[in-house]
Image (cartoon, coloured by chain):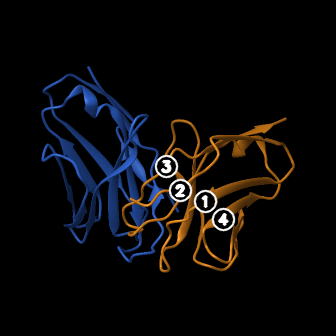
Amino acid sequence: KAGVTQTPRYLIKTRGQQVTLSCSPISGHRSVSWYQQTPGQGLQFLFEYFSETQRNKGNFPGRFSGRQFSNSRSEMNVSTLELGDSALYLCASSISPREQETQYFGPGTRLLVL
Amino acid sequence: DAKTTQPPSMDCAEGRAANLPCNHSTISGNEYVYWYRQIHSQGPQYIIHGLKNNETNEMASLIITEDRKSSTLILPHATLRDTAVYYCLHGGSARQLTFGSGTQLTVLP
């Protein structure tokens, strides 16, 4: 069974631009979560989607948004990019949003904002 | 946020068992302990999780103390590919994972 896939793997943008990242969960997984990982802040939760609905949201500004499609694929969007948005963006999928359901991570998209 | 304490780094000889400790003194009764690892520039990889009983899977064993305030991840026969940062975590919600700084395990040939 294929793992979580994320595209693109690497991205370079400039301040003020916007970016869309894509995540395809493991087949049969319907819950998708997004995380930001930076050397200074570590791993931080962005949001979680299930059945095309956002279930939880972390403490990030409104410039960070996401959505989930009927096939469980998910996208996240960051508008008006700032230098501090440079990070590894990770997508994780699980079968369901049940509390203790294990999350499996993709390889991430490394975003560099210049 | 729930905090865990792990040594920043450990070395292990290839073929030997790697024992990675974690203190999670603030864990509450219904929280699981999770272990993930992350090889440089890759996404975190799930290893194992447990509540109060010791657990074993094809990758590792997890030993949780009776008071649940600490645990040890055991890689029985470490290989060079096990070199990674290992994260121990727990939290009020398993849906919003938070990694600490982890332990950099280096397996030496």
The label shown at residue B4 is 2
* Cα–Cα gap, marks 4 and 3: 15 Å
Which chain is displayed in blue in the rendered image?
A: A
Mark 2 lies on a secondary structure that is: loop
Residue at 65% from the left image edge and 45% from the top image edge? B7
The residue singled out by tag 1 in the image is B23
Q: What amino acid type is highlighted by mark number 1? A: Asn
The answer to which of marks 3 and 1 sits earlier in the sequence is 1
Q: Are marks 4 and 2 on the same chain?
A: yes
Regarding mark 4 in the picture, which secondary structure is present there?
strand
The chain holding disc 1 is B
Give the residue pinned by disc 3.
B100
**Earlier residue among tags 4 and 3:** 4
- Chain letter for orange, please: B
Q: Are discs 2 and 3 less than 8 Å apart at CB?
A: yes
Residue name at image x 19 percent, y 44 percent: A77
Is the residue at mark 1 from the same chain as the one at mark 4? Answer: yes
Closer to the camera in the image, A2 or B43: B43
Q: Earlier in the sequence, mark 1 or mark 4?
A: 1
